[in-house]
């Protein structure tokens, strides 16, 4: 299976929880495939959603100074000068990921100097790695993005099977979805869909549908006591992933049907 999914959304809508549950569900439904979960949000907490022990150190790729210097020929933190713009990255996912229950987690990190568009060794590594993950890996890649699509470039975006924008019934999350869709379209993502999260009633579903009439609605996930309690306890929800609600399973199956290798 070859499937590339990016998840975006306003902070607080449950994007990371949704991303982790979709990654775990796909891995459980298709044990033959390899699933890579990419934490590309500067506030990295996808590990917790996947049930990876947070005391286990995970160094973001952007902070692997020795690796970046070796692959680019330049010291991280420097600007300008000469360095390799096409560094070797194909071994990074297997070397620096942590696996649990069939899902490999890779934490990208963020560039601390010069802004997100800086021409520097760290940004070069991250861009090359994202290109490799989206364009060259014959696997399922599930990406927990920043609110927008900052890590995706024009060269990779056309190969993303779907940008899933997570919203809740709140107006601010729906306004953010419009902005995220514009960003996605600007870089060439063709399939941009809405996933309604934390809906409590039929009225919540109707509000999302009626206020976003020109969006395709992938599905709705209800407000779940299991997720609320898990967050309070600091554990991943649905330890036994087979107990996920039917709504979540149906959403995962719709996304799996986008398999680009078929």
Image (spheres, grey):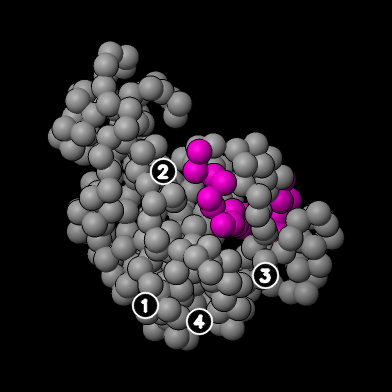
Quarter that holds the N terminus: bottom left
Q: Are marks 3 and 1 in contact (CB under 8 Å)?
A: no
**Residue placed furthest toward the bottom:** 243
Q: Is residue 17 left or right of residue 183?
A: left
Q: Label 1: which residue?
A: 32
Q: Which residue is mark 2?
A: 131
Report x, y in % for residue 220: 66, 70
Given contact means CB atoms under 8 Å apart, are the residues at marks 4 and 3 in contact? no
**Measured along the vertical axis of the image, is residue 132 above or below residue 48?**
above
Between label 3 and label 1, give the one nearer the viewer.
Answer: 1
Number of the label disc, if any, that sits on residue 249: none
Residue annotated with mark 4: 244
Q: Which residues are magenta?
A: 155-175
Disc 4/disc 3 C-alpha distance (Å) = 15 Å
- The quadrant holding residue 235 is bottom left
Relative to residue 112, is residue 204 drawn left or right?
A: right
Which residue of the protein is positioned furthest toward the front in this rendering? 262
Verify CB contact (< 8 Å) between mark 1 and mark 2: no
Q: Is residue 111 above or below residue 24?
A: above
SS assignment at label 3: strand
User: In terms of depth relative to the viewer, which is nearer, 157 or 232?
Assistant: 157
């Amino acid at each position: 299976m070859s499937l590339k999914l990016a998840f975006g959304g306003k902070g607080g809508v449950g994007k990371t929880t949704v991303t982790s549950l979709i990654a775990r569900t796909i891995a459980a439904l298709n044990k033959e495939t390899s699933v890579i979960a990419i934490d590309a949000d500067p506030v990295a907490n996808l590990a917790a959603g996947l049930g990876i022990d947070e005391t286990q150190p995970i160094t973001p790729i952007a902070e692997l100074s020795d690796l970046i210097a070796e692959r680019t020929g330049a010291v991280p933190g420097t600007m300008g000068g000469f360095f390799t713009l096409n560094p070797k990255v194909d071994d990074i996912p297997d070397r620096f990921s942590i696996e649990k229950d069939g899902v490999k987690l890779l934490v990208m990190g963020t560039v601390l100097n010069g802004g997100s568009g800086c021409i520097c060794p760290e940004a070069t590594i991250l861009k090359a790695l994202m290109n490799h993950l989206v364009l060259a890996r014959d696997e399922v890649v599930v990406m927990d993005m920043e609110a927008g699509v900052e890590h995706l470039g024009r060269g990779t975006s056309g190969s993303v099977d779907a940008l899933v924008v997570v919203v809740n019934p709140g107006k601010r999350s729906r306004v953010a979805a419009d902005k995220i869709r514009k960003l996605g379209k600007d870089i060439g993502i063709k399939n941009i869909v809405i996933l309604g999260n934390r809906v409590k009633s039929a009225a919540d579903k109707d509000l999302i549908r009626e206020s976003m009439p020109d969006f395709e609605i992938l599905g709705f996930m209800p407000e779940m006591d299991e997720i609320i309690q898990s967050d309070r306890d600091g554990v991943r929800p649905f330890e036994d992933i087979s107990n996920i609600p039917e709504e979540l399973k149906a959403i995962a199956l719709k996304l799996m049907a986008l398999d680009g290798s078929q």
